[in-house]
Image (cartoon, grey):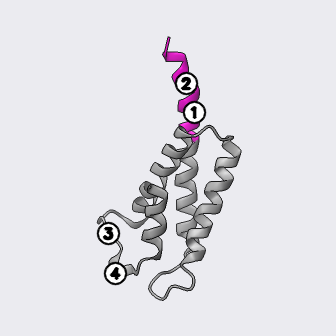
Amino acid sequence: MLLAALVLFTVVPAAERPVTGIQHDLEHFGAFFLPGFLFAFAFNFKTTNLLLGAAAFTLMLECIQIPLPTRHARLEDFVVDTAAIFLGVLLAHAGKNVLPRFQS
């Protein structure tokens, strides 16, 4: 649902997008970190495949905004979003490797 929400918030007119009041880059970072973490923690895909899919997803979201009159595709947003989703995936992967050691 979080991935669907990101798509929805990407395509709605800018005036209708929810705003948290948090600094722009931090808002983007939080919005992409959580889905990356939860998706990687929930599914047993190869980490490399998750990272490639995550990068493709963030690139797609930025490209979707190009023809929209009230939205702007920005390289900075792509970089922040991709870094956040990558960090989420990598931390989930690390957590999945550490948790079994504590379940004895």
User: What label does residue 19 carry, if any?
Assistant: 3
The magenta region covers 90-104
- Which circle's residue, 4 or 1, is located before the other in the chain? 4
Q: Amino acid at mark 4?
A: Ala
Q: Position of residue 42 (x, y in %)?
A: 52, 39
Amino acid, disc 1: Ala
Main secondary structure along the magenta-highlighted residues: helix
The residue shown at (51%, 24%) is 99
Q: In what element is the residue under mark 4?
A: helix
Amino acid under label 2?
A: Val
Q: Position of residue 1 (x, y in %)?
A: 44, 55
Residue depicted at 49% across the width and 67% down the height: 7
Which numbered tag is attached to residue 94?
Answer: 1
Label 4 sits on residue: 15
Quadrant of res 94:
top right
**N-terminal label among 2 and 3:** 3
Whether residue 101 appears in magenta in the rendering, the answer is yes
